[in-house]
Amino acid sequence: MFLIPSFCFAQEIFTLEKSINIALQKSFGIKNAEYSLLASEKSLEAFKASLFSKLDLEFDIPSYSKSLVSQFNPAESKEEFYELGSSRIEGRLSLNQPLIFSNGNINVVGRIFGREQFGTNLDLTKDYYTNVSVSLNQPLFTFNTQWANLERSEINLKKAARNYTYAEQNLIYDVKSAFYNLYRLKESLSITQEKVKQNEESYQTAQNKFYAGLIAEVEALQLEVDLAASKNDLLNSKRTFEEGKNNFKILLGLELENDIDIISNLLYEPLVIDDSVAIASALKNRSDLLNQENDIYLSKLNVNEVDSRKNIKIVLNARYGISNNDSEFQTLFDKLLDDIYVALTLSVPVWDWGKTSRDVEVAETNLLIEKLAYQYLEKTIKNDVIATINKINSAKARVEVLSKSVEIAEKSYNISVERFKSGTISSFDLAQMQLRLTEAKNNSIGALIDYNLAVADLERKTYKKYQ
C-alpha cells in the first residue's frame, strides 16, 4: 500500500518517437484535422445519398377551410359573395429519383383524399379523389449540374484528406521542434549544474588558498560572487525547463499534472542532399500545391457552368397518370381516367444587359487568379526547399566546427584549474575559461539541434524521409 502512490505518480519517460505517436493520437491539432476530414466525408456521403430515391409521405388529418367566395348569380345578374367551406382528409406519397447521368428527375406521385363541402345555398356533399402519376423533367443539351456538384464534393474530400496529411506533417515537425527545444533546455540545465559544481570546487580552492595567505581576499570574494551567480542561473534554468515541459505536454495533449522527462540520443548524421530530387519530391507531394491544382479545375468547372447560361435551353416535361373522382369510395378505382401531359420547352436568352457575359468574365478572372496562385506557390515551394537545404549545410558546418571547440575548451579549462591551484593564474582568468567552456557547450548543442530541426523541416516540405 505504501508503494501505490509511487506507481501512480511515477515519472514517464518520452523519446522522440513516443512523443510523435502520442501527439498523432491526442493533440488538439490532429483531432481538429480529423474532425474536418470526418465532416468532409459525411458531406460527400450525404450528397451521394441524395442521388438515390427519396420517398416522402404526407397526411392532412384533417384540413379545414371556410371563407366568403365571390361568384356570379345569374338570377340576379351580378357577383355575390357566398360562404363556402370544406373539410378534407388527404394522403400523399411522392418518390423522387435524380438522374445524374442526364441531369434529369423522375417523380412518382400518389394522392388520395376524401372531402366534405358545404356553403350558402349548398347541400352538404361528400366525394373522393385519387391520382397516381409518373413524371419526367429532363433538360436537354445543357450543363449537367448534378454531375458537377458530385465532382465538387469528391474534390473537396480529396482536399480535406490532403489537409489532414499536411496537418500530420506539421504536427510531426512541431513535436520534433518542441522536443529538441526541451532537450536544449535540459542540456542547458545540465551544463549549469556542472558549472555550479565547478564553481563550488573553485570557491573551496580559493578559500583554502586565502586562509593560507596565497591569494588576496578580493579573488576569493570574486569566486564567491561567481558561485552565487551560477546558483541563480541554475534556479532560472530549472524554472525554464519546467515551463518547457508544460508547453510540451500541452502540444502532446497530456495533462499538466503528468510528470514527464525526455531522453534523446541526438546524433550528427551528415547528409548529402540533391537539390533537384528534393524539389521534385516537394512539387509532386505537397498538399497545398495539389489542392491548388484542384482549385484550378473547380474554377474551370465554374466557368463552364456560368457560360452555359448563354445557351439555348430545352426541357422535356412529360407525365402519365391515372385518376378518378367519385362520390362513393367503393367505386373510386373502378373507372380510372388517363392523365397525360407532354411539353418540350425551348428557352432562348435574348437580352440581359450583358449580365451573363460579365459573370463569365468574373469566372474567367477567378480562374486566372487560381493559375497565378499556382505559379506563385510553385516558386515559393522551390525557394523554401533550397533555403532549407542551405540551412542544413550551414548547420552541418557549425556542428563540425563547434564539436571540436568543446574539446578544446574542456582541455583549456582543466589546464586553467590546475594553473589556478598552482597560483599561476588569477580567479578572473579561471572564470573566463569557464565562461568559454559553457558557451562552447551551449553553442555545440544549439548547432546540433538546429541541424536536426532543419532536416525535419526539409522532410515536412518535401514529404521525403532523410533520417
Image (tube, grey):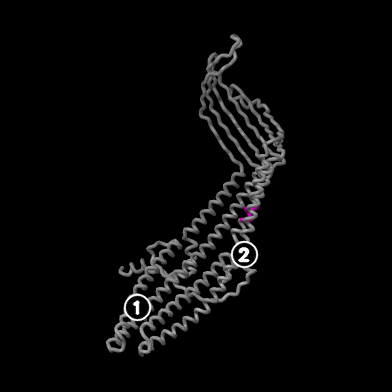
Distance (Cα) linking label 1 and label 2: 50 Å
Q: Earlier in the sequence, mark 1 or mark 2?
A: 1
The amino acid pointed to by label 2 is: Lys
Vertical relation: 189 (above or below) 334: below
Q: Amino acid at mark 1?
A: Asp
Q: Is residue 467 visible?
A: no
Quarter assignment of residue 53: top right
Range shown magenta? 292-296
The N terminus lies in quadrant: bottom left
Q: Is residue 193 left or right of residue 327?
A: left
- Determine crowd level at label 1: few under 14, some 14-19, many 20+ residues with C-alpha closer than 10 A: many
Residue hosting label 2: 382
Name the outermost residue toward the top: 75
Question: Is 258 displayed left or right of 395 in the figure?
Answer: left
Predominant SS along the magenta part? helix
In depth, the one of 269 and 398 nearer the eye is 398
* Picture coordinates of residue 271, whole percent (x, y): 58, 75
Element carrying mark 2: helix
Residue 121 appears in which quarter of the rendering?
A: top right
